[in-house]
Amino acid sequence: YLALDTLEGDISVKIKRKGQGKLYYLLRMFYPWRRPEKPVDAGIGIKKRILTLDGEEPEEIESGRVYVVELTVEVPDERVWVVINDPLPAGFEVVPRWSRIESKDVKKWRMWMRHEVYFDRVIAYARHLSRGVYVLRYPVRAIVPGKFSLPPTLVQEMYTPSVFGRTEGRMIEVKEGI
């Protein structure tokens, strides 16, 4: 990884091949999310809410308390090899010893064949999703008070990335709590 802000002047990338074989490459650019974005539904819809343990929308979020992230995925047509990438805002952590994503419908839970928990995001994968609505939940703890960016959550077909959905990006405030 290379921090572009440490470089001066114009930046170019040159990819060369040695030998006679075919050259395969993947070039990606990651950058911090800085401004609110509007939600997008390009074949898959997604909504994200942060709720209390009772399933209510909190009036304010307090540090030290546990909340539930709820992701609602709307699939209008059959989809294959779907991935959800749900970034956490700074100041939050997934509750330790978290064992699985919960879903309202056990049958629909089985669709999500794998999930990965990182310090800054949760990723869930499904091999096949039939038409319908899927609700996934996982617990998080607000650990630090402050104002933080809540980056957009992305859902997409891995091998057809033009079929995707994205939540809005916004700011979130965590108040001093317990």
Image (spheres, grey):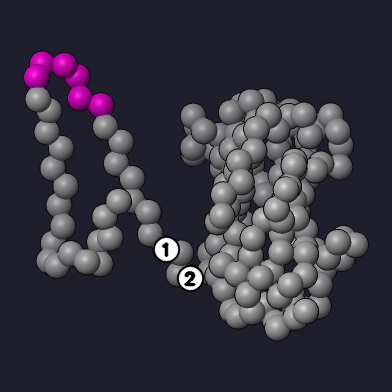
Q: Is residue 125 magenta?
A: no
For image coordinates 73% across by 29% down, the residue present is 111
Q: Is residue 21 visible?
A: yes
The image shows residue 139, relative to residue 133, as above or below, that is below
Label 2: state its secondary structure: loop
Name which residue type carries label 2: Arg
Q: Is the residue 155 above or below the residue 106 in the image?
A: below
Amino acid, disc 1: Pro
Query: Which mark is on residue 32?
Result: 1
- Within 10 angstroms of label 2, few (less than 14), some, or many (20 or more) residues? few
Per the picture, the main secondary structure of the magenta-coloured stretch is loop
Task: Give x and y (percent) for residue 51.
Answer: 80, 63
Q: Quadrant of residue 79?
A: top right
> Magenta segment range?
19-24
Whole-angstrom CA distance, mark 2 to mark 1, is: 10 Å
Q: Is residue 152 left or right of residue 10?
A: right
Q: Residue furthest right?
A: 54
Q: Is residue 118 left or right of residue 56?
A: left
Residue sitting at x 12%, y 28% = 17
Disc 2: which residue: 35
Task: Decide which of 97, 44 is in the foreground and name it.
Answer: 97
Q: Position of residue 10 (x, y in %)?
A: 13, 62
Eyeballing the image, is 29 above or below 101? below
- 88 to 109, vertically: above or below: below
